Image (cartoon, helix red, strand yellow):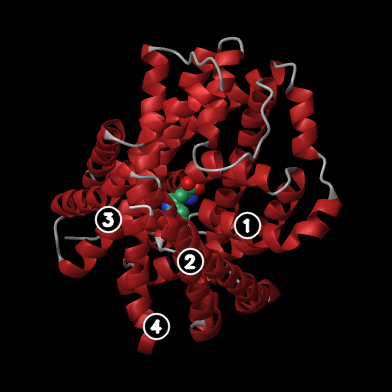
């Protein structure tokens, strides 16, 4: 059977934007920005997207379009020796990320439904925390994890054109419209000016004092939000039928993802300030606890809450499908498995791996920290080394197809990949491993000891 391709250019771009825009933008970005000092972090993050994220998207694009293969096959075809094994890392990473991503996405589905059936009526943040506890673990969590994975499987089973492409053409515009509506509402709140001030006036002193934590956090967030480091962009680019300007497409994708993340700040921070809450108080539950408290307080909070949580659910879905597609494309290309059984089998396996997360949130940290600060960063590092030092000629030539003569920009791109990206990612990896070891020997060891 002929390999599938995108039907339209906009389909490809929306699929990549849909992958990029997800829990990373909405759940992770505000609380990381809060933790790392607000606008100071925002500034560093924007720089990283432009200088590191954009060239790194191109790294994955050229590999995918050149080989027209899944990440495991693509890297095997291009690289000899030990390189041919790094595709495996991507499959492992995809399994792990999707397993907990689906559990968290299930929480958003549950919170949307709570708005519909009961509204958000919580006397105080303590009650909101109790509600979060009942949603996050136990049978409810398991059920919504299952529902979410079932939807992901259904879309991927339908294929590239009739599954992913149609789904993102509906979902991505819906996300943008809902978000703009919410930001307009946020603007009407009295607390908005205070929130904007916090969000938009960078304090350079904060950057100078905290750069050792701001830099890796900004780098990690830039890679995560652009879905880099595990072959999503390789896979999506492998379905490109014709040669077009990859740099332009990557610019649109990075630009839209960033715009959406920045708008999310204009939504979340006014809500938090309106309810008298401090951003960045911490942790996975933060956005749920503080926002349900905010939705109890602000006028029209019930409707706003339903729209907000529903919008996040959609955004998570358009990201989750991209992760499952990496795994499925591997089975189809390499093992000749049909799409439907591949999607169902892998989806169920991912679901099972996520089950422990629905029982105890310590597993969320265990998986998220490992995938995000170790595996993804390692994947990004290996990809940059591979393209920058092993196959730079192929990369430059592939990038020029659909653009024409790259001139000095082609060299500039290769050198950005060779040195600055490698250095930044290497430092982040080091700090990420240190962090993870601290978690294993600290919180996680305590948790085991308490059993
Ligand atoms: N980028 C998505 C987000 O911001 C998450 C995501 C989807 C992802 N696919 C990925 C992250 C692959 C890393 C790698 O939520």
Whether residues under marks 4 and 2 lie with C-beta atoms below 8 angstroms apart, the answer is no
Mark closer to the chain start, 3 or 4: 3
Distance, label 3 to label 4, CA atoms, is 26 Å
Q: Residue at x 74, y 23 (%)?
A: 192
The residue that disc 2 covers is 374
Query: Which is in the foreground here, disc 3 or disc 1?
Result: 1
Q: Is mark 1 within 8 Å of ligand 1?
A: no
Q: Which mark is residue 217?
A: 1
Beta carbon at label 4 within 8 Å of ligand 1 = no
For image coordinates 50% across by 64% down, the residue present is 436
Report the mark closest to the observer, 4 or 1: 1
SS type, badge 4: helix
In the rendered image, residue 163, in percent from the top left (x then y), is placed at: 28, 42
Circles 2 and 1: CB atoms closer than 8 Å: no
Residue 177 visible in the displayed image: no
First in sequence: mark 4 vs mark 2: 4
User: Residue 83: which disc?
Assistant: 4
Q: Is residue 154 above or below residue 422?
A: above
Mark 3–mark 4 CB contact (< 8 Å):
no
Q: Nearer the viewer, mark 3 or mark 2?
A: 2
Q: CA distance from mark 2 to mark 1?
A: 13 Å
Rendering coords of residue 130 (x, y %):
44, 27
SS for callout 1 = helix
Residue 238 percent across, percent down from the top left: 37, 62
Q: Earlier in the sequence, mark 4 or mark 1?
A: 4
**Nearest to N terminus: mark 2 or mark 1:** 1
Q: Residue at x 65, y 27 (%)?
A: 272
Task: Give the spatial CA distance, label 4 vs label 1.
Answer: 28 Å
- Provide the residue designation for mark 3: 4
């Amino acid at each position: 059977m002929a390999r599938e391709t995108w039907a339209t250019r906009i389909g490809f771009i929306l699929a990549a934007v849909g992958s990029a825009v997800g829990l990373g933008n909405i759940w992770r970005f505000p609380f990381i920005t809060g933790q790392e000092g607000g606008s100071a972090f925002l500034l560093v993050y924007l720089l990283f997207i432009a200088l590191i994220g954009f060239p790194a998207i191109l790294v994955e694009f050229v590999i995918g379009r050149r080989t027209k293969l899944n990440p495991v096959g693509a890297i095997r075809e291009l690289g000899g020796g030990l390189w041919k094994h790094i595709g495996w890392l991507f499959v492992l990473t995809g399994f792990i990320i999707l397993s907990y991503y689906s559990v968290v996405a299930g929480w958003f589905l549950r919170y949307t439904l709570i708005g519909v059936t009961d509204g958000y009526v919580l006397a105080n943040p303590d009650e909101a925390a109790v509600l979060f506890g009942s949603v996050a673990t136990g049978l409810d969590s398991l059920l919504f994890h299952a529902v979410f994975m079932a939807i992901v499987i259904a879309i991927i089973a339908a294929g590239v054109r009739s599954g992913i492409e149609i789904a993102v053409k509906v979902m991505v515009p819906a996300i943008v419209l809902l978000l703009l509506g919410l930001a307009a509402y946020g603007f009407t709140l009295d607390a908005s000016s205070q929130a904007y001030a916090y969000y938009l006036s960078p304090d350079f002193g904060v950057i100078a004092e905290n750069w050792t934590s701001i830099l890796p956090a900004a780098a990690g967030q830039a890679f995560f939000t652009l879905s880099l480091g595990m072959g999503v962009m390789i896979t999506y680019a492998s379905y490109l039928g014709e040669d077009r300007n990859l740099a332009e497409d990557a610019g649109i994708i990075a630009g839209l993802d960033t715009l959406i993340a920045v708008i999310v700040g204009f939504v979340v921070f006014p809500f938090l300030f309106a309810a008298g809450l401090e951003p960045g108080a911490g942790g996975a539950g933060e956005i749920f606890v503080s926002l349900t408290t905010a939705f109890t307080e602000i006028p029209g909070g019930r409707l706003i809450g339903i729209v907000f949580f529903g919008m996040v659910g959609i955004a998570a879905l358009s990201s989750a499908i991209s992760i499952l597609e990496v795994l499925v494309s591997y089975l189809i290309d390499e093992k000749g498995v049909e799409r439907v059984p591949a999607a169902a089998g892998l989806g169920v396996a991912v679901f099972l791996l996520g089950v422990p997360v629905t029982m105890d949130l310590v597993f969320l940290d265990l998986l998220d920290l490992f995938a995000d600060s170790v595996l993804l960063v390692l994947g990004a590092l290996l990809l940059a080394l591979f393209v920058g030092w092993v196959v730079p000629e192929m990369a430059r030539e592939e990038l020029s197809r659909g653009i024409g003569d790259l001139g000095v920009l082609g060299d500039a791109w290769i050198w950005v990949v060779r040195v600055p990206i490698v250095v930044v990612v290497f430092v982040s990896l080091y700090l990420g491993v240190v962090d993870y070891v601290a978690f294993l020997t600290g919180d996680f060891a305590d948790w085991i000891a308490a059993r």
